[in-house]
Image: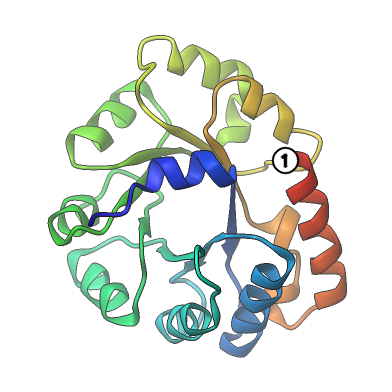
Amino acid sequence: MTLDLAAELAATRLLAIIRGTDTAAAVATGTALLAEGVRVIEVALTTPGGCDAIAAIRAAAPPGSLVGAGTVLTPDAVADVAAAGAQFVVTPAVVDSIGAAARRGLPVAAGALTPTEAYAAVRAGAAAVKLFPASLGGPVYLKALRDPFPNIPFVAVGGVGLAELPGYLAAGAIAVGVGGPLVGDAASGGDLDALRERARAYLAAVA
């Protein structure tokens, strides 16, 4: 059965984005997030050993969790992350990997900023549209984008701090994707205790 990525994101409302400089630290970050109750995690392929990190986090993930791959740009990258066990794919733009992943049954949250890109992403097979960078227009822009596309599931990503989060959900985002404001320097060997505190704060904010 194909994963309904939009429904899962709408249920959890939080996508944690791991983008680090160290494979082991990325894995430690992912397992710490899962332990705190974060249920949807994306590991960016710009992280060294990104596929290895995906495989390790997936192996440690409790039932009901989802581990996916981010910054997936090409069909070859789709094949690599599928082999690593990624359950979904995220892109920063409307790229060739969307169709390649969709054909494999891997759901995609595709990056888009403009109305044309959002529509093109869905036409290419995206299950959800990652509004990126969301901070460029804020919740007001998201609401304007949703008016002509009420049926596109939008995930707000890029510069979504705790203070901004409620505005995006109120404007109609099914979820928010959060990297730096949540993960901090944990995925590069930083403080995991501080990461856990931030995770609890974000989970409370989306509850």
The structure residue drawn at horizontal position 41% and vertical position 50%, both measured from the top left corner, is: 92
The structure residue drawn at horizontal position 23% and vertical position 63%, both measured from the top left corner, is: 74
Residue 191 in sight here: no
Q: Position of residue 201 (x, y in %)?
A: 83, 51
Q: Is 8 left, or right, of 152 in this rendering?
A: right
The amino acid on which the numbered mark 1 sits, given as a three-letter code, is Ala
Mark 1, secondary structure of its residue: loop
Q: Position of residue 145 (x, y in %)?
A: 45, 17
Image quadrant in which you'd find residue 189:
bottom right
Image quadrant in which you'd find residue 136:
top right
The structure residue drawn at horizontal position 16% and vertical position 51%, both measured from the top left corner, is: 99
**Mark 1 closeness class: few <14, some 14–19, many ≥20 residues within 10 Å:** few
Question: In this orientation, which residue lies closer to the viewer: 88 or 73?
Answer: 88
So how many labels did they put on this image? 1
Residue 91 in sight here: yes
Q: Quadrant of the C terminus?
A: top right
Q: Which residue is mark 1?
A: 207
